[in-house]
Amino acid sequence: MSATTGRSRKAHSTPVGLSLLAALGLALVALPLLGLALRTPWSRLGQTLSSESALTALRLSLVVSIAAAAIGLVVGFPLAWMLARSRFRGRALVRGLVVLPLVMPPVAGGVALLTAFGRSGILGRPLHEAFSVQITFTTWAAILASTFVSFPFVVLALEAGIRSIDERLEQAAATMGASRWYVIRRVTLPLLGPQIAAGVVLAWARALGEFGATITFAGNLQGRTQTLPLAVFQQLQTDPEGAIALSLLLIAVALSVIVALRARFLPAS
Amino acid sequence: MRRLLVFAVGCVLLTSACSAAGGDAETNKLTVFAAASLTAAFTQIGADFEAANPGVSVTFNFGPAGGLAAQIESEGTADVFAPASLSWMDEVANKVGVHDRTDFARNTLTIITPPDDPAGIGSIADLARPGIQLVLAAPGVPVGDYAREALRKAGIERAALANVVSNEHADPGVVAKVAAGEADAGIVFASDIAPAAARAVRAVPIPHAMNVIAVYTIAVVEGSAHQPLAEEFLRYVIGPEGQAALGRYGFLPPP
């Protein structure tokens, strides 16, 4: 090996310290997955995953997480737009509130949801007294819990996206007579495609894994509020192998969607 | 090749660092795995035991028996095991091994409702009324299995189970959902509402003939690194101080 090639190789190779830390980081993620794969009861995997309780939980998880991501987009875009474009008093406070579910323990989020939408909550009590409507213990409660913990991802991704849009494009459309709604629908939203995809996928993935707020606020009932993470947790009490199989299913669903969408919307540089 | 080597070294360092931190040789730190329903009573007993034995510290892991048994089997970190179910003690006795096994308390079931009793629950039969929102612990959790047994004895298993709106993973979840007024009724151990939660919920007794008596058993886990201390704690629990504390928290004396 000559001196020159040695130097050029050095310039391109990663420093040893960095490699070690990267290996630590990778091992942190890879070892638990490896452990799960090694402990998986492969011989009875098909039987466990095709059981009625597993399929019910999978179906419910898909419904809840997709609904949460969709609602997150519908309420998240207006919030992101306001945070990025409007000047109003208390904007910092609003932004802080919006990201709070990200740092709040999900169980605390579930308790907070109870105090608002529970049968004796701020909004829940009048709803229950006037219309006999109860949100807790319904699939709506599971969707609400998942939306609560996941929609900050949509807001953060879209706010950054809206800020990066060249405002002159929107101004040009406006000077040609387009209404503000028309500009948002035909200029702003189409330009935000990648950020919408990124925000919605992140929110969906967070909603898919949601556990604490759901079990606290929505309860745990097969077919109604028992999503896959709750099914994993309950299975762990009586059948650890079954719980591992269900965990694998959850990971497979999340991974396949993220990989598929990454290829479609977020091409790697 | 070199990068691969560095990666391999990193992995080895990681695993050896973990095993170095794992061996806890301190002899005065006791770890007790106990039923969720024992939370209040054992926290009190643990504090009393620490006060009586200066320098000793007792750490508790409260949870449903099945989850605790799985952790004991895979991690082996428990010195003492005290489940609310004899079958889970059998499981740990067979797979890991225990000694000094002793029954130390009994518990009965009670119905709980929110303090204002929105559904008008007067007896166990009311749990079968259509539209009642009933919360139980999940099947496989001792108090959940006992509750289903009581409903079966009362002859209302089918109708009452159709009213279940949530299967909680342990007793505190049932008490919390009922105390918050979300559910109309729940079934828990008498000890789950005494004395701390007694004001947060209203109790409706279950007649003796339909009730289930849960027997609590305690043992030293084989392979515990703190055998003498573990045996001492066990003797404290079955001794007069431990029994008095258990009585204050709603438990019955052992059979």
Image (cartoon, helix red, strand yellow):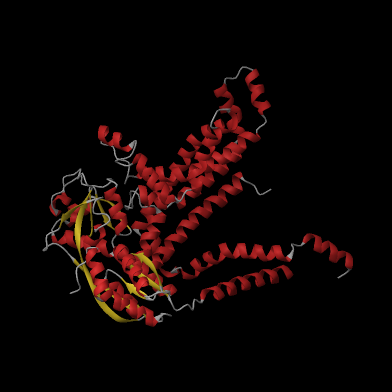
Name the foreground residue: B231 vs A112.
B231
- Residue B216 seen from this side: no
Residue at 18% x, 65% y: name it. B212
Residue at 56% x, 75% y: name it. B20
- Residue A248 seen from this side: yes
Q: In the image, is residue B251 above or below residue A72?
A: below
Residue farthest to the top, as pictured: A177
Quarter of the figure with residue B31: bottom left
Q: Position of residue A39 (x, y in %)?
A: 46, 70
User: How many discs appear?
Assistant: 0
Q: Position of residue A122 (x, y in %)?
A: 34, 37
Q: Position of residue B55 (x, y in %)?
A: 43, 74
Name the foreground residue: B38 vs A201.
B38
Q: In the image, is residue A31 above or below residue A92?
A: below
Q: Which quarter of the rendered picture does the N terminus of chain A lie within?
A: bottom right
Q: Position of residue A146 (x, y in %)?
A: 43, 46
Q: In the image, is residue B219 above or below residue A94?
A: below
Quarter of the figure with residue A168: top right
In the rendered structure, the answer to whether residue A217 lies left or right of residue A154 reads left
In the rendered structure, the answer to whether residue A39 lies left or right of residue B108 reads right
Residue at 22% x, 47% y: name it. B115
Residue at 46% x, 68% y: name it. A40
In the rendered structure, the answer to whether residue B216 lies left or right of residue A183 reads left
